[in-house]
């Protein structure tokens, strides 16, 4: 049976992306629709969003709507956005007071209100459209509180009588913590009992916690992360609640949109390849090394990194690991990312010290991200924690061996290679320390020298299938289960 789903997310490809949340939201909407469901996706009309090749059409009956949050009044209008060659559309919430800013996320004091507006706008649009969603699917702290709004502010409306809420945790490291004085803005007319008493006593409200406590179903983006977030080591203070809600918590591994991430048709590459044309991959590497001005020595591995440069991603381990490895071993390194200055400074410093072997591009570039996947021999993700991670799955398809720490979705998508059996798809290390990551990189470089083992490892990875068409069925199953009387 086709389902009616209202979907809200702070990021969605191809319109606005800071990280994997965008890839996953965009793909989930696309593949749910391909499966026949009526999905209404809502996201902000950021000033910085992609506009080239995008058709934006105002929705005539959704103009100049208003919303009161405590003492603040917001006006917004709604448009649809679609790529010129596609039928897939999203609803853009155009609220200039909230979204006419330089970037998707800000450190401004009203950051939480920017996303409260998005969350309410989804409810208000459903009302104006007469759309009775069976599922309201909220993502991360930005819109999680929608699960509480469904049971309070909007509970009077018969339209939502049969609606069930799903909150997906993409990253528990971001919870949306605001001062307790904001209570009336957060749950207008809603009971204070929905707010965590211990948080209130400490003078704060946790938006993610509030949503998780009320959600009919909580999903997260890998089975291992679903277990990890119930522990003190990974739960970031929400482990107690998540453990208590374990029967309503499920981990569904993210998928890959192979329309976007496949070397056989990647729109950014000058040539295409599959598992039987690794000579093309070698040619792309040569072209890329020349473009970056890196040294091209025969049989020298290229290690790639594409990442937000934040503590989660484990780059602290590289401070002590990479300089000696670069001295002792023969490999090149290319890194793309932005984030905390200490990681940017470190990578910039490595480039200065090893100018022909290390290239750091500070910034965000889809084109470079695709080239790094295609041209590299190995892809490094030493994450401290990783709810799912997408680049390791992209890497597998590109014949680029992932070097990952055994955590979250990395543990669920990469199996350590055993040369004795020829089984496994990457290099996996357990201990979050310098010897751990050094061992992993050393092991990868040793295997790389052994042509036939490396070939097997690359082939194993390229044969993996993490396609969304399969993963989306898991979402439909859990939606269906929620709707059982
Ligand atoms: P996270 O969501 O924690 O950042 P994921 O691995 O799930 O991690 O997704 C990251 C996504 O963002 C990938 O599609 C990756 O290619 C992309 N990405 C991250 N940093 C950059 C960058 N600097 N330039 C281009 N793409 C980037
Ligand atoms: C988050 C996580 C990442 C995950 C992505 C999409 O930002 O850090 O591991 O893949 O969301 O779910």
Image: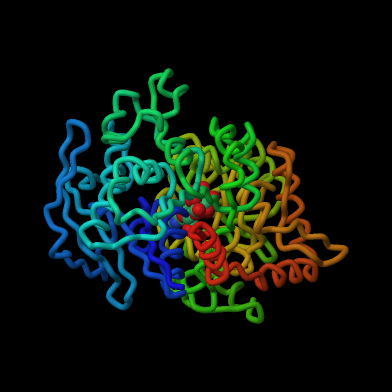
**Picture quarter containing residue 320?**
top right
**Front-most of residues 376 and 458:** 458
Q: Is residue 226 left or right of residue 147?
A: right
Position of residue 371 relative to residue 416, above or below, is below
Tell me where residue 444 sits by quadrant: bottom right
Q: How is the image coloured?
A: rainbow
Picture layout, residue 395 above or below residue 408: below
Q: Is residue 307 visible?
A: no
- Between 438 and 199, the one lying in front of the other is 199
Instruction: Decide: is 103 above or below 181.
Output: below
Of residues 226 and 334, which is closer to you in this image?
226
Furthest residue toward bottom? 276
Q: Position of residue 128 (x, y in %)?
A: 20, 58
Q: Is residue 428 left or right of residue 58?
A: right
Residue in the picture at 47% in, 22% down: 198
Q: Which residue is pictured at 49% across the width and 43% down the height?
A: 309
- Left or right, 265 with respect to 454, comes to left
Question: Residue 342: in sight, yes or no?
Answer: yes
Q: Position of residue 22 (x, y in %)?
A: 41, 56
Q: Could you tell me which residue is drawn at 35 percent across and 46 percent down?
A: 150
């Amino acid at each position: 049976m086709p389902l009616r789903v209202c979907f809200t997310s702070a990021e969605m490809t191809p319109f606005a992306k800071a990280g994997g949340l965008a890839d996953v939201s965009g793909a989930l909407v696309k593949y749910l629709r391909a499966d026949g469901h009526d999905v209404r996706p809502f996201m902000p009309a950021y000033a910085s969003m992609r506009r080239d090749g995008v058709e934006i059409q105002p929705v005539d009956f959704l103009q100049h709507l208003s919303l009161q949050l405590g003492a603040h009044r917001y006006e917004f209008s709604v448009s649809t956005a679609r790529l010129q060659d596609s039928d897939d559309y999203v609803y853009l919430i155009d609220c200039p007071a909230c979204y006419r800013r330089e970037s998707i996320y800000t450190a401004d004091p009203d950051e939480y209100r920017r996303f409260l507006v998005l969350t309410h706008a989804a409810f208000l649009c459903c009302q104006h459209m007469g759309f009775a969603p069976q599922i309201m699917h909220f993502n991360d702290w930005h819109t999680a509180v929608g699960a509480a709004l469904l049971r309070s502010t909007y509970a009077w409306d018969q339209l939502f009588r049969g609606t069930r809420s799903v909150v997906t945790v993409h990253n528990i490291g971001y919870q949306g913590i605001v001062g307790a004085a904001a209570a009336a803005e957060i749950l207008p007319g809603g009971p204070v009992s929905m707010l965590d008493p211990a948080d209130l006593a400490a003078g704060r409200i946790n938006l993610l916690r509030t949503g998780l406590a009320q959600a009919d179903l909580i999903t997260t983006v890998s089975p291992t992360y679903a277990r990890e977030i119930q522990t003190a080591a990974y739960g970031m203070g929400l482990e107690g609640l998540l453990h208590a809600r374990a029967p309503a918590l499920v981990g569904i591994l993210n998928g890959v949109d192979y329309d976007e991430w496949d070397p056989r048709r990647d729109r950014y590459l000058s040539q295409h390849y599959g598992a039987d044309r690794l000579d093309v991959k070698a040619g792309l590497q040569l072209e890329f090394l020349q473009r970056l001005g890196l040294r091209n020595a025969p049989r020298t591995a290229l290690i790639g990194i594409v990442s937000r440069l934040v503590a989660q991603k484990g780059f602290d381990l590289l401070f002590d690991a990479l300089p000696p490895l670069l001295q002792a071993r023969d490999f090149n390194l290319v890194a793309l990312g932005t984030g905390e200055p200490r990681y940017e400074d470190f990578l910039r410093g490595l480039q200065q010290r090893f100018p022909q072997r290390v290239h750091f591009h500070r910034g965000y570039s889809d084109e470079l991200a695709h080239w790094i996947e295609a041209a590299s021999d190995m892809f490094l993700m030493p994450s401290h924690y990783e709810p799912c991670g997408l680049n390791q799955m992209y890497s597998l398809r590109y014949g680029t061996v992932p070097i990952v720490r055994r955590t979250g979705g990395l543990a669920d998508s990469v199996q350590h290679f055993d040369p004795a059996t020829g089984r496994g798809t990457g290099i996996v290390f357990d201990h979050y320390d310098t010897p751990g990551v050094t061992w992993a990189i050393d092991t990868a470089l040793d295997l790389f020298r052994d042509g036939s083992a490396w070939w097997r490892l690359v082939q194993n990875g390229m044969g993996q299938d993490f396609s969304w068409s399969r993963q989306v069925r898991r979402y439909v199953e859990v939606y269906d289960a929620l709707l059982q009387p």
